[in-house]
Image (cartoon, rainbow, N blue to C red):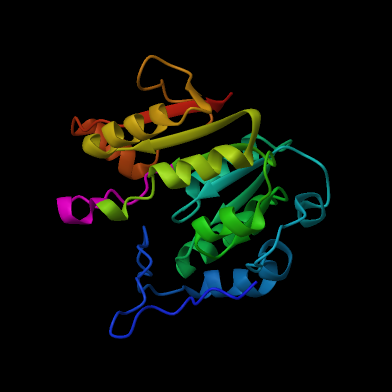
């Protein structure tokens, strides 16, 4: 069989991959840099274009939750401490955020977190196998407010369909946002995925394990809303 020509026609550029994130410039503090040196070798997992052995990565067999975009790691560390029986594979491309979570891991003595500092879409597609996850957390992803940027939003049908295949039956997908138009889009996209079922009539009550962030508390005091969605794999 002849190989397929993957080059675009002459004069046509390769299509750009639409990313849901931008690599923000940010200063890594001295404490975060020390955390990279002290804890990076144990808790950072390099991206690899083939399946990851989760049991080997964590040194045990336990339910694994994928967290996409953990920011500075506040909620991640809180939830990991609450759920020591669960492992958390966490993706973040912002280096100061990775350093901050490594610092929290050291300060709190957490052992059930591993970090992949890479695009979570590629991690999902290439490093995770079907039925391998107990849950997925997507908390406060960039809402890309402007209409022309809505296509950059992370929660889209293709990704949700792929995440659903990575969830074991009964596994859950938990999204949260403080931007109502994005919340409505999330609800529409998740409801349209045939392998997922909503655990609530519309939006869900905030699960106890998800902490209120400082930003969220400030917003609630100003009357801003926060919307949680929890769907389960059928």
The picture quadrant where one finds residue 15 is bottom left
Residue 208 visible, this orientation: no
Q: Is residue 148 magenta?
A: yes
Q: Residue at x 44, y 46 (%)?
A: 158
Nearer to us in this view, 45 or 133: 133
23 relative to 184 in the view: left or right: right
Task: Give the number of callouts.
Answer: 0
Residue lying at 32% horizontally and 30% vertically, measured from the top left? 188
Q: Residue furthest left?
A: 147
Percent x, y of residue 38: 68, 71
Expressed as whole percent of the image width and height from the top left, the position of residue 157 reads 40, 42
The image quarter in which residue 8 lies: bottom left
* Residue name at image x 30 percent, y 79 percent: 12
Q: Nearer the viewer, residue 184 or 91?
A: 184
Q: Residue furthest bottom?
A: 10
Looking at this view, name the residue that lies furthest to the front. 1
Q: Which portion, as a residue range, is magenta? A: 139-150
The C terminus lies in quadrant: top right
> Is 49 on the left-hand or right-hand side of 57?
left
Residue 72 seen in the figure: yes
User: Closer to the camera, 39 or 179?
Assistant: 179
Q: Position of residue 226 (x, y in %)?
A: 30, 32
Quick one: 85 or 213, which is closer to the camera?
A: 85
Location of the N terminus by quadrant is: bottom right
Residue depicted at x 47% and y 27%: 230
Say if the magenta span includes residue 167: no
Q: Is residue 144 above or below residue 226?
A: below
Percent position of residue 186, x then y: 34, 35
């Amino acid at each position: 069989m002849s190989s397929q020509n993957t080059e675009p026609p002459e004069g046509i550029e390769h299509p750009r991959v639409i990313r849901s994130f931008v690599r923000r410039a940010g200063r890594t503090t001295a404490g975060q840099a020390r955390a990279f040196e002290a804890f990076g070798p144990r808790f950072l997992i390099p991206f690899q274009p083939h399946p990851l052995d989760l049991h080997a990565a964590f040194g045990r067999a336990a339910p694994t939750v994928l967290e996409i975009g953990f920011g500075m790691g506040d909620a991640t560390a809180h939830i990991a401490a609450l759920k020591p029986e669960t492992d958390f594979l966490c993706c973040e491309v912002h280096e100061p955020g990775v350093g901050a979570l490594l610092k929290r891991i050291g300060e709190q003595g957490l052992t059930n977190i591993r970090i992949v500092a890479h695009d979570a879409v590629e991690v999902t597609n290439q490093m995770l196998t079907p039925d391998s996850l107990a849950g997925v957390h997507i908390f406060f992803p960039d809402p890309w407010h402007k209409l022309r940027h809505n296509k950059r939003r992370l929660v889209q049908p293709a990704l949700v369909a792929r995440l659903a295949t990575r969830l074991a039956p009964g596994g859950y997908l938990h999204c949260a946002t403080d931007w109502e138009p994005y919340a409505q889009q999330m609800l529409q996209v998740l409801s349209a995925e045939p392998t997922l079922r909503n655990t609530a009539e519309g939006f869900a009550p905030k699960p106890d394990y998800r902490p209120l962030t400082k930003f969220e508390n400030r917003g609630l005091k100003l009357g801003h809303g926060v919307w949680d969605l929890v769907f389960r794999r059928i």
